[in-house]
Image: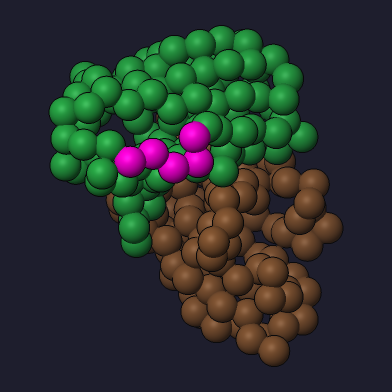
Amino acid sequence: QVQLQESGPGLVKASETLSLTCTASSGSISSYYWSWIRHPPGKGLDWIGYIHYSGSNNYNPSLKSRVTISLDTSKNQFSLKLSSVTAADTAVYYCARYKHSSGWYLEHWGQGILVTVSS
Amino acid sequence: DIQMTQSPSSVSASVGDRVTITCRASQGISNWLAWYQQKPGKAPNLLIYAASNLQSGVPSRFSGGGSGTDFTLTISSLQPEDFATYYCQQANSFPLTFGPGTNVDIK
């Protein structure tokens, strides 16, 4: 069974860069598409973007100027960097893997990590 | 962006009830739609993909339907473990977008 685990600081200062890593416990990270999603408190789910080892990626236009998602195949990890954070970026951040060859459906999710932006 | 809406926003039901949740897309998305269940403190769990395909391991009391702009998720006989929030998600185009959620709680 695929297990995904997010890691990184739970507290980030405003104007700084949020950095998170997702580690996949099984299966090659090169074989699938991977994504970050966030869930701000009291709001709905917000798709951040996806990456594939081929270099293919796509980011939510609402975040595109601040987001970078990258892949490290040697560690079976992928990462999220979100720059110039504000209180509006406070959320539970999830990493997820898409369902293979079926469309853009998020089949496996990490447990989530709460990131709070402090002033 | 494709906007997703859901109705109702909340429903109170009893064990054994049939519950139907509706999701509407702001433009046609064919059958590129998923449903997720989320319980407090947990990640969303994929229930239905491609509008009507049951994800492996999901009980058969869950079913999905619709195409174009209007979709439904039906729970045929509500069980205690089904009390949760349900989200739809369009998979037709980027950015992927989710509905605001429907909370199913105990009457």
Residue B46 image point, x, y percent? 38, 34
Q: As drawn, is A90 to the left or to the right of A73?
A: right
- Residue B57, by quadrant, is top left
Image colouring: by chain
A50 shown above or below B71: below
Q: In the rendered structure, which segment of residues is drawn in magenta?
A: B8-12
Q: Is residue A61 visible?
A: yes
Residue A73 image point, x, y percent? 50, 51
Q: Is residue A53 visible?
A: no
B79 shown above or below A14: above
Number of numbered markers: 0
Whether residue B48 is in magenta: the answer is: no
Q: As drawn, is A43 to the left or to the right of A64?
A: left
Question: Which residue occupies 50% across, 25% down?
Answer: B22
Instruction: Return the residue found at the far right.
Output: A65
Q: Colour of chain A?
A: brown
Which quarter of the figure is the C terminus of chain B placed in? top left
Q: Colour of chain B?
A: green
- Residue A16, by quadrant, is bottom right
Question: Which residue occupies 54% across, 65% down?
Answer: A41
Instruction: Return the residue found at the far front.
Output: B107
Which quarter of the figure is the N terminus of chain B placed in? top right
Residue B38 image point, x, y percent? 37, 47
Question: Which residue occupies 76% across, 55% down?
Answer: A63
Question: Which residue occupies 32% across, 51% down?
Answer: B39
Magenta segment, principal secondary structure? strand
A58 shown above or below B4: below
Residue A67 image point, x, y percent? 73, 59
Whether residue B9 is in magenta: the answer is: yes
Q: Nearer the viewer, residue B103 or A49?
A: B103
B15 shown above or below A79: above
Q: Nearer the viewer, residue A4 or B89?
A: B89
